[in-house]
Amino acid sequence: MDELARWREEFPILSRTLYMISNSLGAMPRAAARSLADYAEMWATRGVRAWEERWWELAGELGARIEAIIGAPAGSVSMHENVTTAEAVALSCVGPDAEKRTIVCTAMDFPSAVYLYKGQRDLGFDLHVVPALDDLSVPGERIAAAIDERTAVVCLSHVLFRSSYIVDPVPVVEKAHSVGAMVVLDGYQSAGIIPVDVAALGVDFFVGGCLKWLCGGPGNAFLYTAPWVKARTRPRLTGWLSRTAPFAFDIDATEVRRDGMAMMNGTPAIPAYYAALPGLDIITQVGVDRIRAASTAMTRRLLELVDASGYRSVASRDPARLAGTVAVDVPDAALVARTLNARDFVVDYRPGVGIRLSPHFYNTMDEIDAMMREIDRIVRTRDFAPGP
């Protein structure tokens, strides 16, 4: 923890705020402002020439950094505007048929993703939503039990956003592949906070984003596509970035790139890429193994204080099943969360689980203690910040 403290100065918000909501938006690295200024300077001085000088291949540059973090082979990651779009690209590689037409997902997946899955019913898919247990967990074995010969795709979260429960994808992948189904693993809440090796997991697709634990800001979702998937299929949701000769403007062009950009579609959000580069570099330098060790220590301390105060938490007490967030349910939790934010103790609130506390490698044990003292004080005094 002491060794990681030197990174605090790279994140300006930490000097004025107790920032503990990296599972929603990671703190901005100081270098991100300089990187965005570089983008503006290139646009101002090079104009349209910036495309050929860097911008056109920037998605591949970003993808390579992400590949190193998630254990993906070179040329397997594509960039997208958000995870819903990335999952839509993955699902566009699959179609329903008479024998295989079911999509399996869980009730604890992020709603935006579930809306997408429900939309696939218009294409002829059926949807099987696996319910959660009472503690809001969905064990991998429970998902695997829902897979049968009619399953075409299994979509699941690696880490559940409400409870931070780590789902073991191994039994899901084994069962899905045994019946010829594909697996889309949502790693938005895992990449950057727990070690991930997509090649070892054997998933067909892995989606995530730089917004949260990778400290890269919005507009930077990514999609890993396994080599065996790319070898036998291509997405219906596609565009000119995927073609080998995009500037031929040939509407009949079918030859696609060999790298991750083969899974991309239209013109990308270049400023977002510039914003993401510094965070990815920092995460790579720090190392996810060290981040995981620090996170485990801080979430353990949080749970000790939560239990000592008598509050409820759905967080797993098994460190192997808990990622980076501890949800704390206190009386008037929504009001407490609003009050904390008004006083620069930055958290968020989710119905059913309470206040989410998500320390990252740049937080400290002193901040853990200060956060819980402030929660205790607000609960005890009911000194809520004014609001609507």
Image: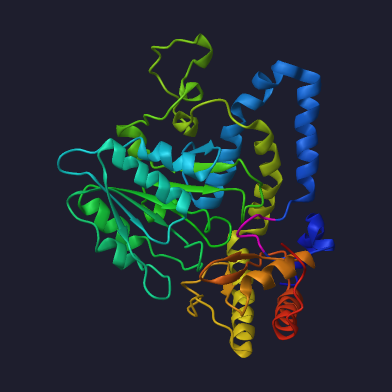
The image quarter in which residue 380 lies: bottom right
> Is residue 179 found left or right of 77 in the rendered image?
left
**Residue at 47%, 73% in the rendered image:** 320
Q: Residue furthest front?
A: 388
Figure label count: 0
Does the magenta run of residues contain 278?
no
**Front-most of 62 and 145?**
145
The percent position of residue 243, horizontal first and vertical second, equals 46, 21
- Is residue 254 shown above or below 235? above
Residue 367: name its quadrant: bottom right
Q: Position of residue 148 (x, y in %)?
A: 19, 55
The residue lying furthest to the right in this view is 16
Q: Is residue 150 left or right of residue 120?
A: left
Residue at 54% of width from left, 78% of height from top? Answer: 313
| Magenta-drawn segment | 21-26
- Residue 359 position in % (x across, y down): 66, 67
Would you say 144 lies left or right of 86 here? left
Q: The C terminus is located in which quarter?
A: bottom right
Residue 297 in the image: above or below residue 180: below
- Whether residue 62 is visible, yes or no, is yes
| Residue 363 showing in the rendered view | no
Q: Quadrant of the N terminus?
A: bottom right
**Magenta span: chief secondary structure:** loop
- Camera-side residue: 223 or 260? 223
Q: Nearer the viewer, residue 33 or 119?
A: 119
Residue 22 lies in magenta, yes or no?
yes
Whole-percent x, y for residue 234 in the image: 35, 30
Q: How is the image coloured?
A: rainbow
